Amino acid sequence: MTTIHTADVGGRSELAAALAEARALSGRCLRHVARSPEQLMLMLFLPVMLLLLFRYLFGGAIQTGGTAYVNYVLPGIITVAITFNATVTSVAVCQDMLEGIVARFRSMPMRSATVLLGHVSAALVRHLVSIAVVVGAGFLVGFRPVGGFAEWLGALGVLVLFATAVSWIAVLLGIAAKTVEGASGLSMPLVFIPYVGSALVPPSTMPDVLRVFAENQPVSLVADAVRAWFLGVPVGNAGWLSLLWWAGVLIVVVPASAWLFRRKAAG
């Protein structure tokens, strides 16, 4: 069992103490990932395999107008990588709830909310590593962005917001699940949402009803905004709509996760 050294809160602000505890707990989560080949595969190898699959197997059959398919699909692969990583977070949270470690944390001089913050912080590190790996692999297979520093900064900001919101959704699902298998199953819809959108193929090729959904669902907005910033073309409404969507998700999911965590941990 991993030992958590809680911060000495004497003379320190509540915020500083909470951040120290969250940092310790996120380190614990990341050590678990480093010792798990399955989680490393989800974080590193699976996104690269998907990129290669769509780049070389399906890319020639998908028309994206004047945009090279690798430039079109790479932002979509990033969104897929983020949602795939959500299953790791759900399973880890559920394991903590079921194996008694949360009860041990509650008996220590630490804030119970930092358990969730630790999981989210660790998830963000995993997401950022996945993004870097996918972009690096993209350059090797022909990805050629033309956006400047400001565009890359905008793309990273939207991706971090998206990853944070998805991580909190995964935390909520992990708390709600009654078994580890159930946690993995509950998070699977997150994995498939990018496929029913503009992440991998242009919605213009879809039937009308499906096209309307694919163009306006929140993951498509992220993929469209990031793609536009990477390619240096006008973002349109996708940028602010994606910010609005995922900020709204955070406003709902964070307090819901905290409430459910307190209820189940107390029970």
Image: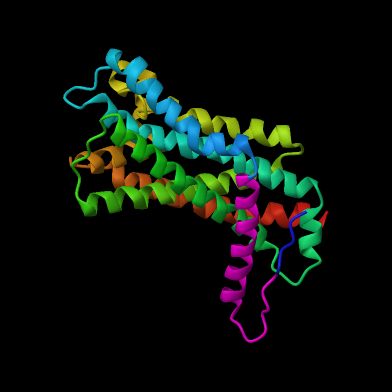
x 42%, y 51%: residue: 160
Count of marks overlaid on the render = 0
x 70%, y 52%: residue: 260
Identify which residue, 40 or 106, lies in the foreground: 40
Q: Position of residue 108 (x, y in %)?
A: 78, 68
- The residue most toward the bottom is 11
Q: Position of residue 37 (x, y in %)?
A: 61, 36
Residue 217 appears in view: no
In magenta segment, residue 13: yes
In this rendering, would 207 be left or right of 169? Answer: left
Identify which residue, 234 or 22, lies in the foreground: 22
Q: Which residues are magenta?
A: 6-34
Residue 255: quadrant of the picture? bottom right
Identify which residue, 66 or 208, lies in the foreground: 66
- 84 in relation to 54, above or below: below
Q: Main secondary structure of the magenta part?
A: helix
Identify which residue, 94 or 206, lies in the foreground: 94
Q: Position of residue 201 (x, y in %)?
A: 33, 23
Q: Position of residue 253 (x, y in %)?
A: 56, 50
In this rendering, would 212 be left or right of 37? Answer: left
- 52 in relation to 242, above or below: above
- 28 in relation to 110, above or below: above
x 76%, y 49%: residue: 97
Residue 36: quadrant of the picture? top right
x 60%, y 70%: residue: 20
